[in-house]
Image (cartoon, helix red, strand yellow):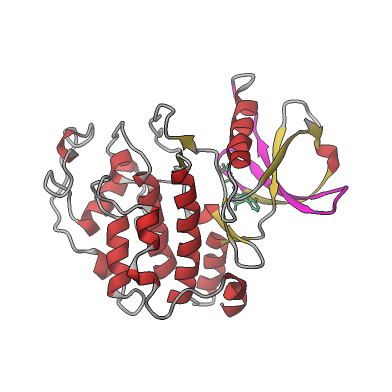
């Protein structure tokens, strides 16, 4: 590994769930980079494996909408490691916070521009048998040219490897698929599609869709809006570990329209959202199918990424 001395650290970008991300400059090339710090955890080698695994995943991938990983460098203390990545200046989450302060919202042309790029990244990941597992607005960034980049592969897994249970408190509840919340042991790529649906609604409404405070509360909020699932809409639902342990109130389906005004999302957009937020993972829309949805052909169509930031 090269040393952190090769970089000049400028400022802290954000505190992630596992470490801090810094903006830095490569002293030789003058390029901006992002440095993700890996905190030392109990096991002596644990943190280096986490950094190496995330870099390996990033290096394996080559897609414009997925952040590029460069290398791992060691810190001034030998128990520190940094993952060096291309620096992506604008966070979609932060952008929305700023816009909300000015009472601004994305138009359909902005939502479509972000969704097409996000879906393209997710299609690539799933075609490569990789689950991201932590898609959320904090993990989608934009370059100055409006090119969307998915970051944070700290939770990502290849499909083949045994599907570990997400431990409670890890990852973000608000984007978590119902099969995970109900402790299903056989989840796969549809979990990312649920998160994409939550992101879609958040871009339209400028606020997160299901803001649960615990796993159970998250399920309650989902059931209130989408209806309590049944064996009918979700074959296999009654056999999930948590379903038999908890008695949920019965709610009818169809509450989504109440959350999202027709002026913000057309009927076609709502139908796409409903297909992302389908309970039965085997019937939930895939990224490839979603990219072909008529919503994207409806006027106004997606704005060019290069025009995105200047048009806000
Ligand atoms: P963690 O896995 O610890 O949650 P992340 O990889 O999610 O860390 O990074 C935390 C935050 O840092 C992200 O939400 C994002 O705002 C910022 N960030 C991550 N990667 C980059 C990057 N390449 N360029 C700019 N900012 C980044």
Q: Nearer the viewer, residue 302 or 258?
A: 302
- Quadrant containing the N terminus in the rendered view: top right
Q: Position of residue 282 (x, y in %)?
A: 26, 45
Q: Nearer the viewer, residue 51 or 11?
A: 51
Q: Nearer the viewer, residue 101 or 75?
A: 75
Determine whether, in the image, residue 84 is placed left or right of residue 312: right
Determine whether, in the image, residue 281 is placed left or right of residue 191: left
**Residue 106 makes an appearance in the image:** no
Q: Position of residue 56 (x, y in %)?
A: 61, 35
Q: Is residue 48 above or below residue 197?
A: above
| Total numbered circles | 0
For image coordinates 56% across by 45% down, the residue present is 152
Q: Quadrant of residue 203?
A: bottom left
Residue at the right extreme of this rendering:
28
**Residue 90 makes an appearance in the image:** yes
Q: Position of residue 312 (x, y in %)?
A: 56, 77
For image coordinates 17% across by 51% down, the residue present is 228
Q: Is residue 182 above or below residue 108?
A: above
Decide whether residue 101 is among the magenta residues.
no
Q: Quadrant of residue 126?
A: top left
Looking at the rendering, the stretch of residues picked out in magenta corresponds to 15-42
For image coordinates 35% across by 43% down, the residue present is 214
For image coordinates 33% across by 42% down, the residue present is 215
Q: Is residue 285 above or below residue 82?
A: below
Determine whether, in the image, residue 248 is placed left or right of residue 188: left
Q: Position of residue 108 (x, y in %)?
A: 43, 75
């Amino acid at each position: 590994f090269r040393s952190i001395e090769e970089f000049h650290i400028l400022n802290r970008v954000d505190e992630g769930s596992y470490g801090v991300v810094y903006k830095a400059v490569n002293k030789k090339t003058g390029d901006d980079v992002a440095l993700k710090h890996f905190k030392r955890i109990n096991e002596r080698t644990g943190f280096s494996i986490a950094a190496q695994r995330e870099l390996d995943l990033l290096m394996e991938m080559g897609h414009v909408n997925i952040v590029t990983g460069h290398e791992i460098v060691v810190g001034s203390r030998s128990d520190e490691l940094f993952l060096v990545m291309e620096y992506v200046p604008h966070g979609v989450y932060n952008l929305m916070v700023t816009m909300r302060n000015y009472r601004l919202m994305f138009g359909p042309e902005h939502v479509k521009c972000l969704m097409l790029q996000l879906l393209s990244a997710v299609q690539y990941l799933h075609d490569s048998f990789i689950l991201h597992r932590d898609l959320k607005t904090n993990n989608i960034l934009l370059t100055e040219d409006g090119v969307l980049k998915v970051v944070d592969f700290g939770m990502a897994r290849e499909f083949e490897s045994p599907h570990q249970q997400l431990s409670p408190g890890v990852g973000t509840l608000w984007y978590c698929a119902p099969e995970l919340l109900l402790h299903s042991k056989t989840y796969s790529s549809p979990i990312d599609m649920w998160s994409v649906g939550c992101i879609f609604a958040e871009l339209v409404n400028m606020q997160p869709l299901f803001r649960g405070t615990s796993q159970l509360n998250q399920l309650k909020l989902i059931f209130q809006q989408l209806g309590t699932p049944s064996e009918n809409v979700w074959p296999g639902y009654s056999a999930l570990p948590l379903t038999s342990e908890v008695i949920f109130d019965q709610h009818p389906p169809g509450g989504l329209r109440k959350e999202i005004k027709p002026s913000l999302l057309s009927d076609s957009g709502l139908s796409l959202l409903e297909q992302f937020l389908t309970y039965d993972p085997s019937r939930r829309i895939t990224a490839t199918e979603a990219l072909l949805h008529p919503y994207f052909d409806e006027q106004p169509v997606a704005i060019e990424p290069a025009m995105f930031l200047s048009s806000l």
